[in-house]
Image (spheres, helix red, strand yellow):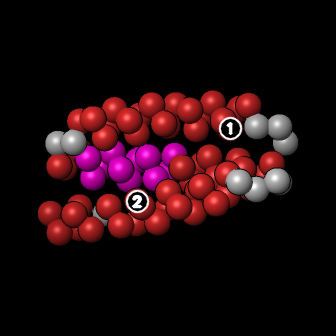
Amino acid sequence: MDGFIDFLQWPAMAVSLIAAYLIGSKRAERRILGFWTFIFSNLLWIVWGWHDEAWALITLQLALMAMNIRGIFKNEA
């Protein structure tokens, strides 16, 4: 299980990059998908951070998740 958790940082990074790309879209639907994708990456980072006891990373991801949730509601569709 430790090997899987250690590997999890790579999919988390890739999902974060995909989310950033989607957030830059002119289409509201893609931006909303980007926020949801960022939330998924936040969860992946939290799992990885919990395993490595990276408390600052977990706190950052929780704060970013709150901003992503706000982004979903503030996004003009």
Residue pictured at 67% horizontal, 58% vertical: 22
Residue 18 seen from this side: yes
First in sequence: mark 1 vs mark 2 = 2
Quarter occupied by residue 46 = top left
| Nearer to me, 70 or 60 | 60
Residue pictured at 68% horizontal, 38% vertical: 72
Disc 1: CA contacts within 10 A as few (<14), some (14-19) or many (>=20): some
Q: Within the magenta stretch, is there residue 61? A: no
Q: Residue beneath label 1, please?
A: 72
Q: Indicate the position of residue 28 as horizontal and vertical percent values.
A: 80, 48
| Nearer to me, 24 or 8 | 24
* Residue type, numbered disc 2: Ala
Q: Please state if 64 lies on the left or on the right of 51 as rendered.
A: right
The range drawn in magenta is 39-49
Q: Residue beneath label 2, please?
A: 12
Residue pictured at 78% horizontal, 52% vertical: 29
Quarter occupied by residue 69 = top right
What kind of element bears circle 1? helix
Q: Quadrant of the C terminus?
A: top right
Q: Please state if 60 lies on the left or on the right of 75 as rendered.
A: left
Q: Indicate the position of residue 51 as horizontal and vertical percent values.
A: 19, 49
Disc 2: CA contacts within 10 A as few (<14), some (14-19) or many (>=20): many
- Mark-to-mark CA distance, 1 and 2: 20 Å
The kind of secondary structure the magenta stretch mainly shows is: helix
Q: Quadrant of the N terminus?
A: bottom left
* Residue type, numbered disc 1: Ile
Q: Indicate the position of residue 68 as horizontal and vertical percent values.
A: 58, 38
